[in-house]
Image: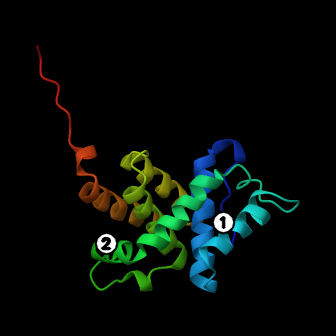
Amino acid sequence: MTASKKPRTGEITSRTAARIAAVQALYQMDMAGTDVNDVIAEFIEQHFEGDNRDETLATADRVFFADILRAVVRRQREIDPMIDEQLAEGWRLVRVDSILRAILRAGVAEILDRSDVPARVAISEYVNVAHVFFDEEEPRVVNGVLDKLARRIRGHEFVSKRVTPT
């Protein structure tokens, strides 16, 4: 699975590359039932390093990549119902495109597990990841779902801080 619109290598950070790789790995795990440790090893060997590496992904933060995958696997029973609640009435996560499903799962996992990454940054990053794979509605879906969940999970980051005059 490769991205439809590859950003120029200089435009992405090592964490952005890790997020893109994580979405691709989650897609692979979803489609082929690949074990998380096997897919991590495969991505490091084939996509990040070696003669056939993907230049976009070669800069990926490998630890961050593995952390995202392990968080999704560890918390998937918690993540999927949270996403289901945010989807339009009549839609369930299992009906969503598998790449979009991977983006949403990774985004929610990061919001849940990575307090070192501000929620707004995680949302923005996964909207950008969605733009790598999709042109139309999907990035808006990612923004809406992740924003609602981040406000619920990390509401304190969205409280406006008013400055009182002295």
State the residue position of label 2.
82
Helix, strand or loop status at disc 1 = loop
- Picture quarter with the C terminus: top left
Q: Is residue 133 left or right of residue 89?
A: right
- The one of 85 and 114 positioned closer to us in this rendering: 114
Q: Position of residue 82 (x, y in %)?
A: 31, 72
Q: Amino acid at mark 2?
A: Met
Is residue 97 shown above or below 145?
Answer: below
Q: Amino acid at mark 1?
A: Ser
User: In this figure, what is the number of numbered marks?
Assistant: 2
List the single residue furthest toward the right. Answer: 51
State the residue position of label 1.
4
Residue visible at 50% across and 79% down in the picture: 97
Q: Position of residue 61 (x, y in %)?
A: 64, 50
Helix, strand or loop status at disc 2 = helix
Q: Are marks 1 and 2 in contact (CB under 8 Å)?
A: no
Q: Position of residue 24 (x, y in %)?
A: 62, 69
Q: Is residue 166 left or right of residue 135?
A: left
List the single residue furthest toward the top. Answer: 166
User: How far apart are the alpha carbons under marks 1 and 2?
Assistant: 28 Å
Mark 1 and mark 2 lie on one chain; the one further toward the N terminus is 1
Residue 137 can be seen in this image: no
Q: Is residue 40 left or right of residue 98?
A: right
- The one of 116 and 28 positioned closer to us in this rendering: 116
- Picture quarter with the N terminus: bottom right
Is residue 108 shown above or below 78?
Answer: above
Q: How is the image coloured?
A: rainbow
Residue 124 can be seen in this image: yes
Residue visible at 32% across and 57% down in the picture: 147
Residue visible at 26% across and 81% down in the picture: 89
